[in-house]
Image (cartoon, helix red, strand yellow):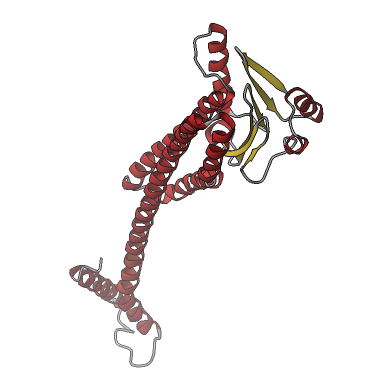
Amino acid sequence: MITRYPYRELVWIDIEKPTHEEVRALMDEFDIHPMVADELLGPSVRPKVDRHENFIYLVLHFPAIRHSHGSSQAQEIDFIIGKKFLITVRYDAVDPLHKFSKVFEVNSILDRSNIGEHAGFLFFYMIRKIYASCIHELEIIRDQLGDAEEQIFAGRERDMVEQLSVINRDLLTFHRALRQHEATLNSLARASEEFFGNEFRHWIENVVGEYLKVEEMFEDQKEVLANLRETNNSLLSTKTNDVMKVLTATTFSILPASLLGQIFSTRAGGMPLIDSPYAFWIILTGMIILAGSTYFYFKRKRWL
């Protein structure tokens, strides 16, 4: 599906799940190289930057917004940046692009915005919006970590094991999607300097700065998660040790009493109290006294 967003002399073409016919139309209208057109038909494995005579071809992957789509896979956006046109190709619904299109459409109708004289500036504002959505997603994860911290110190360590694992999965998704962005954007800066002129390199360096904000926030959340998991594991281990200590001490407390009961259950010749009508109560009382004495001994030694 192709959607066009014109603005003065510029035009933004957004395509979701392009067909052969749509890609052919782009080739004819914007003189897209056949090799690039072929790559638009399906997702790419890695990010890349290709400088062509009349456009720059850029491929980037972004972490999927799990809280919106229920997916943990990275989303790809292919950018074709020309002098007077910007083409975005995607294979899934990308929320930041949808939100940007609404703002761009309103500004275009009202003619309020001053984007710039070429499509490179349009790309600049668009990519900033996408990185802002990544920061928003990390803020959601930060809030989840805060809630998990409260739950951990409220005594719900066992319940937080799964929650912390889910957060860790989200951070891994971010890392896989964004780990090559800095190198790709630096390559884009060099290509855009040749294509748009020296003055535009500053704008792409600002894009690198936006990415570094995301990266810094990601590293902070990763460190917080690691500390919380270590704390949670320590508290779980302490509770488990306490339970095992109580069970062990309880077992040893009743061991002498059990031994006494086993001795009198043999009914060997010459066994004392064997013929006494109060034998059962005497033995039971002795077992209780032995168990109680052992328990208080452990208590005195602070083993319980």
Q: Residue 295 falls in which quadrant of the image? A: bottom left
Is there any visible trace of residue 198 in the rendered image?
yes
Q: Quadrant of the N terminus?
A: top right
- Give left or right: position of 88 versus 24: left
In x, y percent, where is residue 36? 73, 36
Q: How many marks?
A: 0
Horizontal and vertical percent position of residue 95: 57, 27
Percent of width and height locating residue 242: 32, 62
- The residue positioned 58% from the left and 14% from the top of the image is 105
Quadrant of the drawing holding the C terminus: bottom left
Give residue 281's quadrant in the image.
bottom left
Q: Is residue 259 above or below residue 30?
A: below
83 left or right, relative to 112: right
Q: Residue furthest left?
A: 300
Please report the residue visible at 44 percent of the width from the left and 35 percent of the height from the top. 140
The answer to which quarter of the image holds residue 246 is bottom left
Please name the residue shown 38% across and 43% down the image.
148
Viewer-proximal residue among 59 and 85: 85
- Camera-side residue of 297 and 58: 58
Residue most toward the bottom? 269
Residue 119, placed above or below residue 300: above
Query: Is residue 65 in view?
Result: no
- Looking at this view, name the residue that lies furthest to the top: 110
Residue 220 falls left or right of residue 14: left
In front: 50, or 257? 50
